[in-house]
Image (tube, grey):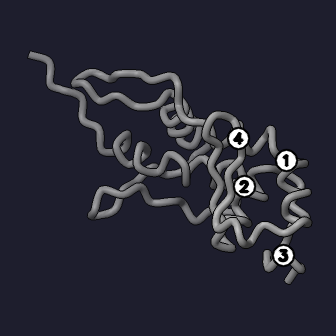
Amino acid sequence: MAQSGIADLSAESAPSLLQQLRRDGIELAAPGGRLRVWPAARVTPELREVLARHKAALVALLQPATEFVTLKGGLTIPVLALQLALDLESRGFPLKTDDNHAFIVPDDPRLTARDRVAIDRWRLHLGAIVEYQPPLMS
């Protein structure tokens, strides 16, 4: 374990770093393009350096959705969530929900760190997309 209490700060990419930090109980947000970390007490000089190195990519991953699409019947979802669902489906990943209508993350080694971060971010929307039933045409 590294001095910071984080298992591994050597992540090569922002998605891998974000995934590792979440596993270690550290959350990030990017309100107004500023990187916020909590719990703040866990931010060591080493972690601060790593975050600074990946800041632009982390902020991009954490920015709120700005483009939406409305499907027939009124379901409005972020374009990025719909693009993720289509991408996963085109790559052969099953899009399923459980009995509670929650998206089931495929247990598949082909999922990249970027995939996992995106699935985590858009999980509720993915569930809505999978469960979506267009209205019947009369």
- Spatial CA span between label 3 and label 2: 22 Å
Number of residues whose C-alpha sits closer than 10 Å to that of mark 3, classed few (under 14), some (14–19) or many (20 or more):
some
Query: Relative to the observer, which residue lies in front, 132 or 52?
Result: 52
What is the secondary structure assignment of the residue under circle 2? helix
Question: Which residue is at a point 25% across and 24% down the rendered structure image?
Answer: 74
Quadrant containing the C terminus in the rendered view:
top left
Question: Which residue is at a point 24% across and 29% down the rendered structure image?
Answer: 134
Please tell me whether mark 1 or mark 2 is closer to you in this view.
1
Q: Residue 18: which disc?
A: none
Query: Relative to the observer, which residue lies in front, 132 or 66?
Result: 66
- Spatial CA span between label 1 and label 4: 13 Å
What is the secondary structure assignment of the residue under circle 4? loop
Query: Relative to the observer, which residue lies in front, 95 or 127?
Result: 127
Circle 2 sits on which residue? 113
Q: Is residue 2 left or right of residue 61?
A: right
Query: Relative to the observer, which residue lies in front, 45 or 69?
Result: 45
Type of amino acid at the residue the image marks with label 3: Ser
The mark that comes first in sequence, 1 or 4, is 4
Q: Residue 34: which disc?
A: 4
Q: Residue 54: which disc?
A: 1
